[in-house]
Amino acid sequence: MKRLKKAIFCISITMLLTGCGKDKVEYVTETNTPTDSVSTDISMDSVADKIGFNEELWEEAVDDATVKRIYANVTVPDVTGMKVIDVNMLNHQESPEAKENVLKAFAEGEIYRFDEGYIPKAYYQADVDWNQAVIDANGNDMDEWVLERYNELFEIYNNAPDDYVVADDFEPNSYRIDYDNLNMLVSFRHYNEYGTSNNSIMFTLEDTNSLVEEPNKNVMVEYGAGGEYLSDDNRCTMTVEEAQEKAEDFVAKFNAGDFEVVGTEQIEFNVYYGELDGYTYTETENYYDGYVFHFFRSIDGVTVDGNIYHATSDAVDQALDAAGAELTESYTYTPVNSMEQITVFVNDKGVFDATYNSPVEIKEVVADNVNLLSYDNIKNVVIQEMQNKDYYQYVTLRHMELTYFLWHDKINDKYSIVPVWRASDDSPQTMLYESMLFGYGDTHFIVANAMDGSIINVGEQMISFYKYEPEETYASDEYDIE
């Protein structure tokens, strides 16, 4: 039996900072913004007063012919200034010390290796027993490729150590620890395929079948985020608030700074109970049990955008704009979780699953009170961007917010957190749910640097293109979208 888990689930300051103190700004594109200075405003007035913000609802008919409209609730944070912060994108795979710090922060007792050749026999036992029973029941009726797969498992099992091996260094990338009375696997991952990167720290249960109380049955457990609407039939006996407190305690152990919950979902379980009737499961149970919490970094109470743009329609169009390309049968694309986000699964057993995507480390606060473009000028920027792009046809932007963005300077491979204006046709929370649940969201957005009005090409930040060759699967050729 195979256990499955379905978890439905960046600037050097040499960027885009000119024009900060101007009363009037010409339309700025993403291609003409480099500079090396930041102007500041150290007065103690609120940001809303500094930028001349005077409306909570912005109504604008941008273009009647193509039905481009704005009917947006506008939010400005209650702060006296916004910052520019240089950060480091962490790659734990290349830092044994960083891995050790994470593991020791969470481990309650010994830290064991769990990389190839160090996984004990007990981990494979249930699968071995199940597979052997299937072989005994079916005999010569089994397909040859199935037998080959089973024999591969048996070979791994026979060569596995009898017990866990304590880690004597932190060069490997997979470990087993005890956390809050649960046996957890911790893996450090770094993907650098096709010129993109995706760092993550992943926590999962060693045995996901322990999530259900059916010891006498062969079980396969799948679980994932079940949507933003919380149902009354959730089996978790904790309140959402109690579960969130457990998630917050978990996140605090990373010692990575302040994070806030920006979205809460329920956990949906699919449990398959098997009988020895071949290779199928004869009974399925579906239910809700627990909650998923999405955390974004917080700067003075203002969140930094996370993966709300992941695989959205506008991200694809923006990336194509940057590449000067068209999506054809010969080319495909992949979204990259390049934005910082922590996702935590909690039910009565505790935190049993978590992923920290794109962890960053605060390097330097470049400026505490940057000079922001006036609200009226930002409105002009948004209007012109809508007018200039065909993919905003028949779109009404309904949300607009002054917030933060993790910007990746791809040329210099540097990351910074900068203040931006984000206008979208759906709420950021719904954009997050759609990208996590469905892997694609037909949502529209504009992200503009709040200091100079330059448009940030989010698609270029988050998507890479590849030439697809059926013979080779994915070739190494790639559109240069930098």
Image: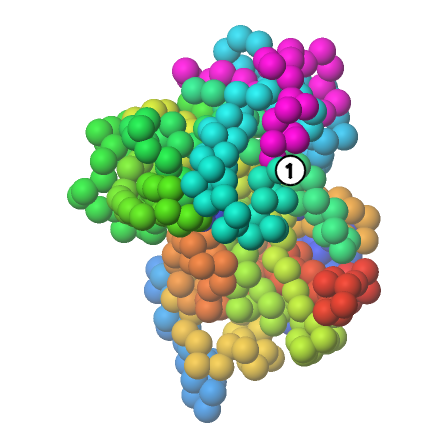
Q: Is residue 291 magenta?
A: no
Q: Residue furthest top?
A: 109
Tell me which residue sits at (67%, 78%) in the image. 329
Secondary structure beneath disc 1?
A: helix
Residue name at image x 38 percent, y 66 percent:
398
* Quarter of the view holding residue 209: top left
Q: Is residue 19 left or right of residue 257?
A: right
Which residue in the protein does label 1 denote?
152
For the point 65% across and 30% down, the residue is 156
Q: Residue at x 74, y 62 (%)?
A: 474
**Residue type at mark 1?**
Glu
User: What is the x, y in percent for residue 178?
Assistant: 49, 16
The boundaries of the magenta stretch are 153-181
Q: Residue 69: percent from the left, percent from the top?
A: 42, 77
Relative height, residue 216 to residue 307 (above, below): above
* Residue 65 located left or right of residue 231: right
Of residues 143 and 181, which is closer to you in this image? Answer: 143
Query: In the rendered image of this protein, does residue 11 appear above or below residue 440?
Result: above
Tell me how many marks there are. Answer: 1
* Left or right of residue 129, residue 406 in this image: right
Is any atom of residue 200 visible in this view?
no
Q: Which of these two is toward me, 83 or 46? A: 83
Q: How is the image coloured?
A: rainbow
Give percent across and percent down for residue 247.
Answer: 40, 29
Answer with left or right where residue 390 lies relative to residue 366.
left
Please determine whether, in this image, residue 132 is positioned above or below residue 50. Answer: above
Q: Nearer the viewer, residue 176 or 426?
A: 176
